[in-house]
Structures are given as structure tokens and as C-alpha cells.
Image: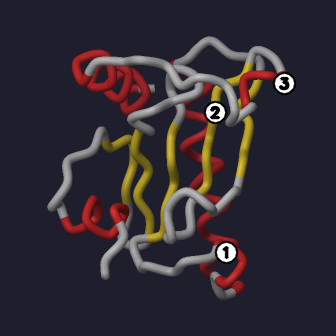
């Protein structure tokens, strides 16, 4: 059965796209820890991040770096944090989270309650950055 992320890649489920190429997609998390919280995924469905082959693992990190720089230009933050957890969705993914403090990347914190309109505006700011 296809993961929710594979359904997003296929266009069956909408998302707020930030960046995309033939191999990867970056889109806003709909339950963000901070404004600009972005997910980076390979388009190929691979469950575990560390099962990515060496080339794909290298390229996803380079793609994520470019997206993180876009986020830094669009969202006021000290840094963009990176988390690879892999328990939420059985599809390899990287969280890019704008940080003001270490607690901003605590996944046990309550998520932000954001509207689709606000997500769309945030995605637009990041894409333009």
C-alpha cells in the first residue's frame, strides 16, 4: 500500500510544495513545530532513511541543504534544524525546522494550529526566497 507521501508525490493528496526535482520533493508539514517546518522526501518510496543507497542519500542531503537555505531566507530563525525520525510515516523523510531554541525541535511539543491559507502563504514566501 502506498504511503501518504507517495500519494502526495502522485498528486492524489495536495501539499504546499516548496521545491521539487526528478528525485525529491519538499513540502510544508501540515502539523508543524514551527512556521516553515518542511519535509523533504525521495519520490521513490523507501521506508527507512538509512536504506537509501549511497548516491540517493548524498543527493537528498544536498537537496535538503538548498531547501534549508531557502527557509533561512524566508523565515526569521537562528538556524534550520534537521531531524530524521522515521516512525511517523513509512517513507524516508527529513524534517527541516526553523529554530530559535533547542526546544523548537521537540516533537513532543504541541504542534502549531495553522490554516491552509497560512500554509500557502508560508510556502509562497519560501519558494520566492
The residue singled out by tag 1 in the image is 57
* In this view, 89 is above or below 110: below
Q: Residue 41: horizontal and vertical position, in percent? A: 49, 62
- Residue 100 is left or right of residue 93, and the answer is right
Near-viewer residue (129 or 68): 68
Secondary structure, mark 2, is: strand
Q: Which residue is drawn at 27% across and 25% down?
A: 120
Q: Residue 29: horizontal and vertical position, in percent? A: 44, 39
Tell me which label, 2 or 3, sits earlier in the chain.
2
- Residue 94 is left or right of residue 104, and the answer is left
Asked if the residue under mark 1 is in contact with the one under mark 3, i.e. CB atoms within 8 Å, the reply is: no
Q: How far apart are the alpha carbons under marks 3 and 1? A: 25 Å
The crowd level at tag 2 (other Cα within 10 Å; few <14, some 14-19, many 20+) is many
The residue singled out by tag 2 in the image is 97
Q: In which quarter of the image is the N terminus?
A: bottom left
Q: Quadrant of the C terminus?
A: top left
Q: Residue 92: horizontal and vertical position, in percent? A: 56, 68
Q: How far apart are the alpha carbons under marks 2 and 1? A: 19 Å
Amino acid at each position: 500500500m502506498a504511503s501518504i507521501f507517495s500519494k502526495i508525490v502522485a498528486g492524489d493528496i495536495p501539499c504546499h510544495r516548496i521545491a521539487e526535482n526528478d528525485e525529491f520533493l519538499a513540502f510544508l508539514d501540515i502539523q508543524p513545530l514551527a512556521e516553515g517546518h518542511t519535509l523533504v522526501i525521495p519520490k521513490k518510496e523507501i521506508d527507512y532513511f538509512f536504506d537509501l543507497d549511497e548516491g540517493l542519500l548524498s543527493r537528498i542531503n544536498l537537496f535538503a541543504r538548498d531547501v534549508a537555505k531557502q527557509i533561512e531566507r524566508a523565515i526569521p530563525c537562528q538556524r534550520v534544524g534537521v531531524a530524521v525520525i522515521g516512525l511517523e510515516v513509512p517513507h524516508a523523510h527529513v524534517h527541516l525546522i526553523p529554530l530559535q531554541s533547542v526546544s523548537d525541535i521537540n516533537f513532543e511539543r504541541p504542534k502549531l494550529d495553522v490554516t491552509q491559507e497560512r500554509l500557502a502563504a508560508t510556502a509562497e514566501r519560501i519558494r520566492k526566497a
